[in-house]
Image (spheres, rainbow, N blue to C red):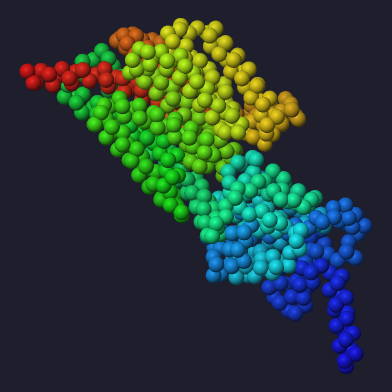
Amino acid sequence: MKTILKTCLILVLALCLCIDEPASALLSSVMTGNPQAQSCAWAGQGKGPIAHDKLKPSLLNEQEKAAYAAMPGTGEVFLVVAPHLTWSKITNDKTPTLQMLAGKAAVANVITEKKIDIINRLANPRFHYRRINSTSMVEIEGFIRELYENLSPNDSLLITSSPALSKISTYTLPCYGMLIMVDGGDNGLICSSTVRRSGLITSSNVAAAIDTLLVEKQRNPANLSIYPFTNSYGALQRTTMLSRNDSVADSIDESEQGFISVFIGLLAFTLLISAALISLDIRYKPRFLKHVLPLARILWIVMLAIPLATFVMHLQLPSFTTAEISFDFFGFVVMEISFICIIIALVFRWSYSLLFMLAATFSILVIDQLLGGPMTVTGYLSYSPLDATRYYGIGNEGASLVFASWIMFSGFILTRLPSSANTLYRRAIFPLGSLFIIMVCAAPWWGSNFGVLVWGIVGMLVAWAMFNHMHITWKHLLLAMIIAVVVTLCVFVLDTFLNGESHLGISTKALTTDGWKVFATLFINVVRLSWNTITFSPFLSVVFVIIVAFLAFLRWGKPGAYQQFWDENPEFTGAYTALMVTAVLMLIIEDSGILMPALVLLYETAGLIWLLCNKHSWHIRNFIAQNKM
C-alpha cells in the first residue's frame, strides 16, 4: 500500500512539473470538485472549454511553440468580462480582492467606441477570455481572487464590464464600462492619446493594449499612459470618482431632452418680450418701459447664464447623480450666476452685469481647457462621449460660446474705455486675445476643434478691421478666408509631426491613406449631421432662418432710426457684423447644423437688446425728471 501511495505521489508531482503553476492550481480545484472553478472554465483557441487556457507545452502545436519561443519573457493575457460588475459594487467587505486591485492596479471607465473582435484574438495561445454572467459578487470575487493569486510575474489581467470587449454582444450598458488592468506594475488612472482624460479610455484603446501585451512585456502598453493616483484611500477614491463620472454622463444624456425643451421655451418667451423693444421709432409710454426694460434685461441675464451653467454645474454635482439631480443642480447654478449678475446691476450698472457675464463665459471655458477640460467631459452644450464622436477638446458648441462671448465683450468694452486704452485694446489686446482663444480651441494638444481655424480667424479679422474703422468689402473677406486656410494647413502639418491620435490627426491620417474616398465620406457625414439637426425640428429651423434674416435686415437695411443707432455704436456694430459672418461660416463648414450659429446669435441678440434697452431708458429718465419737477 505504501508503495502504491508513493507511486501516486510521484505521478502527481511529475504532472505538476509539466503544467504551469496557475493551471495546476485551477486543475486541482476542478479535480477536487470545486463547483466555482468548474463554472469558470476558460475558452480559447476555438478548442472548447478547458479548465485553464495556459496549456501544457506538450499540447502546443509547432506554430504555437514558435510563437512562444519568439517572445521570451512575455506572459499570458487574461480578459475577464463581468457584465454585472460596477464600481459601486466593489467594497472591502464583499470584494476585498477587487477592492485591492482597484487601489493598486490601473483603472478607467471604458467608452464603447466600437465592438472589438475577441474571437480572432483567441487564436493567439497567449490570450484567454472568460465571461462571468453571474450577478453574485461573491462568485465574481472568488474567481478573480483565484485567478489573480495564480498569475505569473509576466502575466496581465484585464477585468471589465464593457460589452464592446465581450466575445458576443448580448447586453448593453447605459453608460461606460469599468476596467481594472493588472499589467505588471501600472498603478493609477489610465489615460490614452485619443481621449486625453485620466480615467477614461475607449474600447479600441483596450484592444490596442491587449495586442501590445501579447507581443511584448511592458508597462503603459500601446497608446495608454497612467495618471498617478495613489494615497491611503486610493481604492475608495478611485471607485467613487469613476462611479461619479459614469453616473454624471448617464444622467446628462438622459436629461438632455428636458434641458432642450426648457431652453427653447425660455428663449421663445425672452424673444417675445424683447420684440416689443425692437422699434426705435415708437415712443413707448414710460410706465410700460419701467416694467419691460428690467424684465428684458433679467431674462437675457438668465439666457446667457444657461450656457455657462451647463459647464460650471460639473463643479457642484454630487458623487452620485441621476437625471433629476443633474437637472436640479443645473437650475441651481443658473440661479446662482443670474443672482450675481443682478446684484452687480443693482449695486453698479446694468451694463456691468452684462460685461461680467460675457467675461465669465470665455474666461471660465478657456481656463477649463488649459486645465484639461474637467467641465467639458460631457454636458448639455458640449459633445457626448457616449455617442463616440469625439473624446476631448472644447467641442463645437463650447468653441462657439467662447468666441461669441469674447467678440461681444470686446465690442462692449471698447465703448467704455478712454481714448488711450481704447486704442491699445483694439490694436493689440484684441488681436492677441483672439489668437490665444483660437489657439486654445483649435490647438491639437488643447481644444482640437480645428473648424475654429477657419471661422474663428475670419471672424476675428472682420471684428479687428471694423474696430479700427476699416471698410470691409468682399475682397477683404476673401483674403481673410485665404489666410484662414493657410493657417489650417500649417496646423495640419504641425499636428502630423506632434501627434497622430488627435481629433485633427486621425482625419489627416485617413486622408493621406485613402484620399478622396475619405474626403467624400467626411463631407457626406458633415452634410448628414447638419441636416439631421435641421430636420430634428423643422419649425425651429424656420424660426432660426427668420431671425437671421431679420437681424441681417436690421444691420444692412437700417430701417428708421437704426441708421443713427449703428453710427452711434461703431464698436458694437463691428462685433455684430463679425458674429453674423461667423455664424454663416459655421453653418457651411461645421457639422452642428443650426446649433452653433444659434448660440453665436444668442450673444449677438443679447447685445442688441441690451443697447436697445439703454436707448429706450432715456424715456424713463425724462419721466422721473419731470415728476421731480
Residue 564 seen in this snapshot: yes
Please identify the quarter of the rendering in which residue 332 is found.
top left
On the image, the x and y values in percent for residue 260 come to 43, 38
- The structure residue drawn at horizontal position 28% and vertical position 16%, both measured from the top left corner, is 279
Residue depicted at 34% across the width and 34% down the height: 302
Looking at this view, name the residue that lies furthest to the right.
62
The answer, for residue 261, to whether it is visible in the render is no
How many marks do you count on the picture?
0
- Is 46 or 55 nearer to us in this picture? 55
Establish if 11 lies above or below 321: below
Going by the picture, which residue comes out furthest to the bottom? 1
- Quadrant of the image occupied by residue 502: top right
Give the vertical position of 379 relative to 344 (above or below).
below
Question: In the visual, does 455 lie left or right of 488?
Answer: left
Query: Which picture quadrant has residue 357?
Result: top left
Residue toward you, 145 or 388 = 145
Residue 218 % position (x, y): 74, 51
Residue at the left extreme, as displayed: 629
- Residue drawn at point x = 79 percent, y = 72 percent: 24
Give the residue displayed 84% in from the left and 69% down from the top.
19
